[in-house]
Each structure stands twice: as structure tokens, then as C-alpha cells.
Image: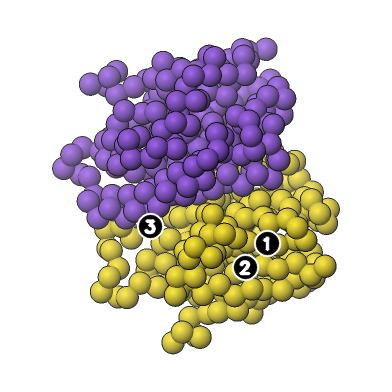
Chain colours: A purple, B yellow
């Protein structure tokens, strides 16, 4: 049965799920959530996900939320992208939720999707500091290795790259991070890889 | 063999690991990390944990970092506190890393451990908004149920309560969250429960 993914193009967390589905070759279809008009915070949406967020994966009678949990679900279901010690995959997916994309997402929102006169400079500075520190950890980790966990492409790579292909600026320039840049090129060379705006409905262009 | 936990009293993330070890009845001892003098960011410490953070659990020849990964390690090792669907435990531990304690920790730091004249008001306001929104999600989730995942106390409860027993203010008042308050009382009534400052070395009192 075709899985359904509640998502929208701008969400790097939804992108992780969409990319894992696509690379796994699973049958899935997106369900657009109109986040920028508040659709993730309605009582109706909270009936689907009490956390009030995308992504949400519907797989038969199972509903899975939180991108990291969806990645484990897809990885365990297909047996793909799990070829590393599970503890190491888990550790990097948790790190990513706390310090990687978990900070990049809000920063990109503040810097791009708020009206220019409402962008909080000091808050942006604070979150930027956290984002840069985490990117340095990832850069050091990827220096001399090809993948985040173990020696193969895994769901940990999908988690950590969730916000790094988007064009909207949040202080991440691939030219500043040689190992991350090479790693992103390895991922985007995988068969079936797609850019977030080509994989999910909704993009800034639609709202321009 | 006695496990070692790199930690310090003020870290709610380290507290999660310490509390899980203590409630599980495992033999462990703390290794104090002098975070407030930069000890988590030294090259020597990065040899132990490239992420530059506590907690770090040393169990024989295994080194485990990220509190959520340590919780799974302890839960799987002892078979305790895992009595809920694994996907549901994982989902809440990930949510907590991103939106729960993952935001509460930095907010508490900004509001209490920076010198008063260096506390960034706008950044505090931004993170506060995120912390309050997440507390509302947790309050709604716990309303009418005793535990975070499934029907028993699990490592998901340990994750989500990591910063909620500390005295330093960060806009969380138990009186404002009836269900969270009752849940915290259930946890602290468990045999062997200890307050973070009674479980790990280091506290603001030591530095006063």
C-alpha cells in the first residue's frame, strides 16, 4: 500500500523522510501541509500528530512522527541504509536532532521566512553560534571518512544532510566546509537522489 | 565492571544518564567534567567525545555519547524501563532532543549561568517561546496518562524530565502544568530516585 507523507517542501525534517522513501524505492505520496498558513498547528492536524509538526508518515495502520523515528522505520522495513552499528546511527541522529538540523531549521526560518523587519538579530546571532559550532563538529567528523556512521551510506547521513541542500542562506557555505561539501556531493550522486523542492510540494517560489 | 559517567551536576543531559544508571541498580561512578572552566571543549576531552559534550558513558570497551543513546544502552543492557513500543520511546526521545530538554538546557544556561549583564534578552525570548510551546505539547500528552510512552515508566520519561527538577528558573513553574507536575511527582517517588545535585558532582553552590 502506498505510504503517505505529510510534508511541505521547505521542511528539511520532512525532506529526510521523503529522501529516505525515494532512495529506498518505496511507493509513497506526499500530502501537502500548508505550514505557512498554520496548518501544522490546527486541532485537526494535532489529531494526526499531537506534536504539531511534519513529517508524519502513514504506513498502513501505523502513524510515525519525528524524522529520526521515520528514518529508523524505513531502514528497518527495507533493510537498507542501516549498515553501521545501530548505536552509532542512533547517536548521530540524536546529535542531529539536538544540535544539527534541530538548530539549522529554526535559524533558516528566522533568516528567510520571517518578514525582514521582524527578524530578531540577537536571536539569530545566538542560534548562528550554535549552528556554526555543530557544523565544525560535523566537518571534523567527516574529515577522512566518507559517511557519518560506519563505512556505508546510512539513515544517519540522511538525517544530518536534511537542511544542507536548500538555497536559502543561514550562514552555511559549502566552500567553508570541505569535508561536508564532498559528503553532500557523495549523497547527491546516489541513484534516485532529488533536491527537496523537486521531491515535495511547496517552495518559496510558490509563495512569491 | 563499574561504569564511568563523565558528567557534572548542572547538566540535565548528564542527569538523564545518571538517573537511569541509579534507578537500574548498575554499578557506576561519576567522572567530573569542569564544564564551566571549558573542560568539555578541550582537545583532550574531544579525544573521548568528538561532540565536545557530556554525558559520556564508558562501559568496558564501549564509549557511548548522547544521552538518548546512553538511555537505550542502559535499557537494553538491563531490560528495564523499556516496556513500551520501541518506536514510541524513540519518537519521544527524539522530540525531547529537538524540542524538550534540547531547548530547556540552553535557555537555563542563558538565564542563569551567564553573567547578568551578558544575558541576551531577545535570544532568551526566542528560546523561551520554543520551550513554552514544547511544554504545552508535553502537558497535553500527559493529561490523562501516567507515562510518556506506553503504560509504564520508561527511558522516555527519564529523557523528558532531564531539566525539570532543577531549581534555576527558566520559565517552567510546575504549578502551571498540572499533568507534568503530577508526572514529575510519580518519577521522584520511584525507589532510588535522586535529585541531580545529589547524584552528580558539581552544582552552582560549589561555584558560589
Element type at marker 1? strand
Tell me the subunit letter for badge 3.
Answer: B
The foreground one among A110 and A154 is A154
* Residue receiving disc 2: B6
**Quarter of the rendering occupied by the C terminus of chain B:** bottom left
| Residue name at image x 71 percent, y 51 percent | B72
Answer few, some or many: residues within 10 Å of disc 3's Cα (few below 14, many 20 plus, some between 14 and 19): many
Task: Return the x and y of residue A170 as percentages of the image width and height.
Answer: 30, 40
* Residue located farthest toward the front when viewing the structure as drawn: A144
Q: Is residue A108 left or right of residue B151?
A: left
* Residue receiving disc 1: B57
**Quarter of the rendering occupied by the N terminus of chain B:** bottom right
Q: Are marks 1 and 3 on the same chain?
A: yes
**Structural distance between the alpha carbons of marks 1 and 3:** 30 Å
Q: Are marks 1 and 2 on the same chain?
A: yes
**Structural distance between the alpha carbons of marks 3 and 2:** 28 Å
Q: Is residue B40 left or right of residue B89?
A: left
**Structural distance between the alpha carbons of marks 1 and 2:** 6 Å
* Residue receiving disc 3: B128
| Residue name at image x 37 percent, y 49 percent | A132
Tell me the subunit letter for badge 1.
Answer: B
Answer above or below: position of B158 versus B200: above
Element type at marker 2? strand
Amino acid at each position: 500500500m502506498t505510504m503517505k507523507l505529510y510534508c511541505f517542501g521547505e521542511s528539511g525534517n520532512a525532506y529526510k523522510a521523503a529522501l529516505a522513501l525515494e532512495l529506498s524505492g518505496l511507493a509513497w505520496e506526499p500530502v501537502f501541509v500548508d505550514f505557512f498558513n498554520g496548518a501544522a498547528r490546527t486541532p485537526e492536524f494535532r489529531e494526526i500528530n499531537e506534536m504539531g509538526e511534519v513529517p508524519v508518515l502513514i504506513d498502513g495502520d501505523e502513524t510515525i512522527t519525528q524524522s529520526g523515528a521515520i528514518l529508523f522505520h524505513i531502514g528497518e522495513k527495507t533493510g537498507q541504509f542501516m549498515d553501521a552499528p545501530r548505536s552509532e546511527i542512533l547517536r548521530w541522529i540524536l546529535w542531529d536532532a539536538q544540535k544539527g538540523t534541530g538548530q539549522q531549521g529554526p535559524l533558516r526560518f528566522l533568516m528567510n521566512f520571517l518578514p525582514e523587519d521582524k527578524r530578531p538579530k540577537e536571536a539569530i546571532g545566538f542560534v548562528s553560534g550554535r549552528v556554526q559550532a555543530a557544523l565544525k563538529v560535523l566537518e571534523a567528523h567527516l574529515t577522512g571518512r566518507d559517511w557519518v556512521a560506519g563505512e556505508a551510506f546510512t539513515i544517519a547521513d540522511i538525517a544530518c544532510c536534511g537542511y544542507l541542500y536548500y538555497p536559502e542562506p543561514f550562514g552555511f557555505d559549502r566552500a567553508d566546509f570541505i569535508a561536508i561539501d564532498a559528503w553532500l556531493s557523495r549523497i547527491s550522486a546516489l541513484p534516485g537522489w532529488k533536491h527537496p523542492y523537486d521531491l515535495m510540494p511547496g517552495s518559496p517560489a510558490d509563495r512569491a
